[in-house]
Amino acid sequence: MAEVFQDPTRPVGERVDDLLPRLTLREKVGQLNQRLFGWTAWRRTGGRIATTDALDEEAERWGGLGAVYGLLRADAWSGRDWTNGADPHLSREVAATVQERVVTASRFGIPALFVEEAPHGHQALGSQLFPTSLGAAAAWRPDLVERAAAHVAREVRARGAHVAMVSALDVLRDPRWGRSEECFGEDPLLAALCTRALVRGMHTEPGIAVVLKHLIGQGAAIGGRNSSGAPIGPRELSEVHLAAARAGVDAGALGVMAAYNDIDGVPCVAHERLLTGVLRDEWGFEGIVMADMFAVDRLMRVTESPAAAAALALRAGVDLSLCDVSYTALERAVTDGLVAESYVDRACRRVLALKVRLGLLDEPAPLPAFPPPDPVSELVASTAVLLRNRGDLLPLTVRPRRVAVIGPNADDVRCLLGDYVPPLPPGAGTTVFEAVRAIVGDAVTTPGCTHLDAIDGGRERAADLAADADLVVLVLGGTGVRDYDDDFEANGAARLGGARPAATTGEGFDAAEVELPPAQRELADAVVAAGTPVVAVIVSGRPHGIGHVADVCDAVIYAWYPGPAGAEAIAGLLLGDREPVGRLPVSLPRSSAVLPVVYNERLETTLRYVDAHAAAEFPFGAGIGYTTWSVGPARASHDTVTTAALPGLSLTTTLANTGPRRGTQIVQLYARALIPGLLPRRAVHCGFTRVTLDAGAAETVRVEVEPDALPALGLDARSAGTLDFWLSVTGAGEPVDPVRVTLLAVHPDVVDVVAVGR
Amino acid sequence: MAEVFQDPTRPVGERVDDLLPRLTLREKVGQLNQRLFGWTAWRRTGGRIATTDALDEEAERWGGLGAVYGLLRADAWSGRDWTNGADPHLSREVAATVQERVVTASRFGIPALFVEEAPHGHQALGSQLFPTSLGAAAAWRPDLVERAAAHVAREVRARGAHVAMVSALDVLRDPRWGRSEECFGEDPLLAALCTRALVRGMHTEPGIAVVLKHLIGQGAAIGGRNSSGAPIGPRELSEVHLAAARAGVDAGALGVMAAYNDIDGVPCVAHERLLTGVLRDEWGFEGIVMADMFAVDRLMRVTESPAAAAALALRAGVDLSLCDVSYTALERAVTDGLVAESYVDRACRRVLALKVRLGLLDEPAPLPAFPPPDPVSELVASTAVLLRNRGDLLPLTVRPRRVAVIGPNADDVRCLLGDYVPPLPPGAGTTVFEAVRAIVGDAVTTPGCTHLDAIDGGRERAADLAADADLVVLVLGGTGVRDYDDDFEANGAARLGGARPAATTGEGFDAAEVELPPAQRELADAVVAAGTPVVAVIVSGRPHGIGHVADVCDAVIYAWYPGPAGAEAIAGLLLGDREPVGRLPVSLPRSSAVLPVVYNERLETTLRYVDAHAAAEFPFGAGIGYTTWSVGPARASHDTVTTAALPGLSLTTTLANTGPRRGTQIVQLYARALIPGLLPRRAVHCGFTRVTLDAGAAETVRVEVEPDALPALGLDARSAGTLDFWLSVTGAGEPVDPVRVTLLAVHPDVVDVVAVGR
């Protein structure tokens, strides 16, 4: 007869309670460790998979393992590629073989969690890759984020892994950050909606848990410098950074990752108030908290002893480490009296509960089949944001005779992918040049410059091609491409130092200047001078200053990193097969000198510098399509409201498609909260409604306040004042004809905070 | 017989208690108002001073007046100049005439406080002007700040005014801010020491109270944009921003000004926790809190009703408004029940107590005589920081035959002054060109470019002059010059908009790019190309990126705004009459793209961008003189210490002057606190010792931890861990051979915060 902990008919808690007391301290500490780089746990030998000494030693040391990270990871850092890595089929064998070794080492046959990177597709050979988070957010389509996530989850599970790590929680406040592409933008609401959808999608696969990266505030790191601190206050933290995490937890996320950064001095992995107070006591989170890679070890900058660092993180609420050496010292920490064993039990209980929930302690069930490819084309096509379209150049009314596809991103499929991706299968994917050529037949290409530098004669060759074409597609931006001979930090981030790597975005690739580099601006000038119409396509993971390019080119499309199917989608937009429907998920600054330019800073007295405007060049929410629109006056569903009742409030207006073709519009609802004693944010995005209308049609549109928007408004039950609401189809900005709603406190005796001194 | 409130033998409280209950609500509200622009209260007519209708109306309205701002202010905004303003002699008549009118209007003969701007000299005609705060801080000479302040106080009192407003509390965290020059730099300790000295100096004059500007955090305003919010946390606030204010209060400051900015959403003028909790309850402050100009009115952005805005500020702890219209609505606020009359009484008690303390309710005593001019030459000469000196060009060993003094600041005395200054007397002051010519005889000058733009042929003329000279002094930087036809905001800040004003620094002149403008860099290139040795002198109120100039010129002196006597001091440095002894009070960044670069950010994982280093180009504390030094190993006075005992700790080393001439060195003490659970600041400046040694001499130097350094270390009585201390004569940076000291908690049961879970 099976043990209680193996009995799937028993409640999770009961099963864990049965197992936990039987484990030794060492076995429990083993469950909290995830030290191995998974790709070092196995090798291909004679067509079969064998485990390594490294795995043997680690599994024997702990009598099993808590988790194994990156078993299937394939990229330049892991060194796994199509010659030595695991395709979908082989992945199952890798997982089974490694798991068998772990189970054998465990007195109770406890399997390890297999934890994989899957921020926009699984970082494993042969996986489906999607737009990075920032691009996905630009679609303003949480439903499609959900669909893509469900596909990723199915793939990950089909290979035999259990936990998918996905970037979602970082709110992008400084575009210099190399990891900008991993954020769902600068807006707490859009990030929350996308995170909620992501968790839903991931959890459609019963055997999969998602770990949301990162808790919290890394998007506000000073100077946009990776993993630097966020010296922000509790109100800024709560209003800007916590909404996405809260939404993810509410949606049932089973894991969050504690971030590298500190918040006002306290590192997130040592932040008991955050990891235990907010996350568990206030929000009721019941999953696991994983530390970011080597983040616990970084506490040794202060504590010096690995045991003390581990004790600090464990006490704060870190359950599972990631690669840290210090977490292996938890046994020592307990025996030395640095932390009570009850904290080890607390964490181990959570790890075991997750294993129970995911079925690891049940009889093994067959894995689902690896799903057929699904690029979620609608998501890919919806990420592109059209920002300029002079003289309605787009969509092209006449198929061009010859197109010159120019620029450093013109003919490189890898530049479409972003960070945290595996090598594509040989020959897979389509470059922008190839996609355009497939449509128009006659196309030519030249890079013109590199991402950062001019090429000898590059501008001249580009100008020549432009002059001889009747359309130029100028593909500029950045690249996250990693070479297998790049240097890496211990945590896989790119190491800057020696030879300059090819990439300009991604983890480790923070940039001081976010304006497009001079070499690219000069290329634009040279190409434009040829006199041929120019469509600029910005392919990048970072918000760039694109003002100069927007000034000189006829049309500008911001395409982010759309994934390997992105080029075909872009080519389709040019000819009007589809309309661009994306909207900016982040404000675009003119240059780094005017940062920050996020749309929802608090009111400022001046947005002028002596030498520049401080306003965004293109604000959050901006983007146009191929038709025109009119928006009628708005009215609110209520004249008065309480904070608790706010999500019941909506604004209604009449939207009309006044242009020549069917089109889609995103009607955005913004608010400014006027609460005595608090300086309001310029605007707070509260909700949006997507509407598709035929040419000439009109429709009544209602936009509701989303519950996920409440944190950004900074209200509580005692808040009283007024709320100005307005609708926009051009993005964030100053209120336009706002509708004023009275906000009543829930408790009548504190209706007016000004009156307390009465 | 005199009333109790008039009896100077009685305690202050008793006198106020006698007077306050006799005042009507209106009279009390009148004491809290400072609405008039003082320069509109009087006019010169037929050689005599007359009061205006504006004064009559205001005094009659309230039955007296709380305070009058800027009675003697002379500048472009007030429109007062040498043709229509008040020189020192006339000032006494102005003060007496206006006071007589106020006293007459008051049933109890209560005079008004006359409040004047005096940030680096009194902003009145004929006053002595000193270096701006940032320049004064560069001298690292609080004793000289004290001496200058004492002179200013004597002048202000001699003219019949009572309150001097001085910028001191803003800590410079973003050099884009136009008011950078008003800060004592980026370091909490240096700011605290200078503020303490300033208050001591001001209060040597018994009839003078200082109002310290601004409480608090405006130096951290986002984007360096004037009066924008500081979304910082409590630890950042306490460790970086509060130390100077605390020092000023401890030194007996009788006034502080509540700042424009919000802290994490709460405007300072509505911040009860700050103005009452911290300032009064924790620190024991007994003076007045004045709001910044129109800052209470700005609360109407949220409250809409003037009475509600006033009630909010009054409740929070604002005692005296500055020009706000809303504060006149306090009567209404009380009668409408928005705030209790007890709050009016509280504020009025403080204003009356200040008047009693300053002797306004005593029999008028004769004013002191206006003091003779005293530029405090040692302060002026000590502000200059030598940053480069290739081939020991300086001091010049041979008097040059001809010197070309080139640059936009070469021959303009007004560019030496900074913001908040009166017009100089006709013919007063010396330009750099004039000062150099006075020494070498043969000197020529040309601007070469404007502060921001090239001049047609300017570079060529400059290069020609350079080629024909045997030394070039290249005077670059910024300017705070205000023209009498500039536009101004309601609060006197420059208004940007129409025609570009001449200034590039000062209130309202925030700059996006802090690197010296291209026009100035190109001028440097052109001049250097002439082959003559070039000494660059940077005259500006802002930390600039000067890397290019430092790369191409032979020597670089950062001179700040040294005041009208500054040019002579600079000229004296060139010839070695004095040695440059200043040290940077703020880090110099390469450009705005890498901000922030302050020396005491918390530890970061990377200081590299893809395209730039994030480190300061010249760090806080940097600066060289005309000799060389060696510093021996350091030892600490204690191996263990508690937080409370930290100011008893010192480091000792042997300092030797290894160079060719007598010189002065500033030995700086830095610490890094290693406290489990907190990310340390890279370095915290804890104290310094100034040493002057003959060539070849050596001396034992002791540097003590200053009490004012404790806030920045972020320790409390329960803090335990280790402290690394080190000495530096090259400025802030990574620890070099640190001495490790054990920090013990005061309470043995919390010796180790990690062990709490035991």
Image (spheres, coloured by chain):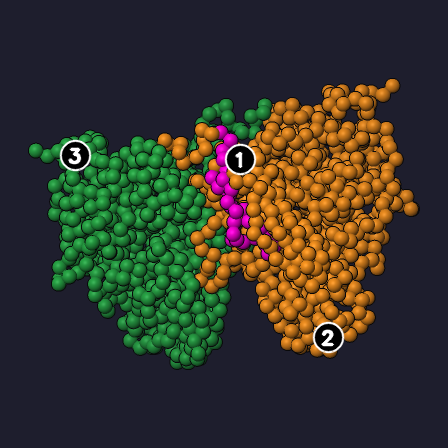
Chain colours: A orange, B green
Name, please, the residue furthest toward the right: A46
Relative side of B261 to A184, left or right: left
> For the residues marked 3 and 1, what is the alpha-carbon distance in whole angstroms?
51 Å
Do residues under tags 3 and 2 come within 8 Å of each other at their CB atoms?
A: no
Do residues under tags 1 and 2 come within 8 Å of each other at their CB atoms?
A: no
Which residue has dot 1 on it?
A642
Q: Helix, strand, or loop for circle 2?
A: loop
Per the rendered image, the range of residues in magenta is A721-747
Q: Which mark is residue B5?
A: 3
Q: Helix, strand, or loop for circle 3?
A: helix
B94 within the magenta span: no
Residue type pointed to by label 2: Asp
Q: Which residue sits at x=73%, y=39%?
A: A200
Residue type pointed to by label 3: Phe
Mark 3 crowdedness (10 Å alpha carbons): few <14, some 14-19, many ≥20: many
Q: Nearer the viewer, residue A133 or B471?
A: A133
> The C terminus of chain B lies in which quarter of the figure?
top right
Relative side of B644 to A64, left or right: left
Number of callouts: 3
Q: Which mark is residue A470?
A: 2
Residue B386 shows in this picture: no
Q: Which residue sits at x=50%, y=45%?
A: A740
Residue type pointed to by label 1: Thr
Q: Earlier in the sequence, mark 1 or mark 2?
A: 2
| Subunit under mark 2 | A
Q: Helix, strand, or loop for circle 1?
A: strand
Q: On screen, A466 above or below A717?
A: below
Residue B452 shows in this picture: yes
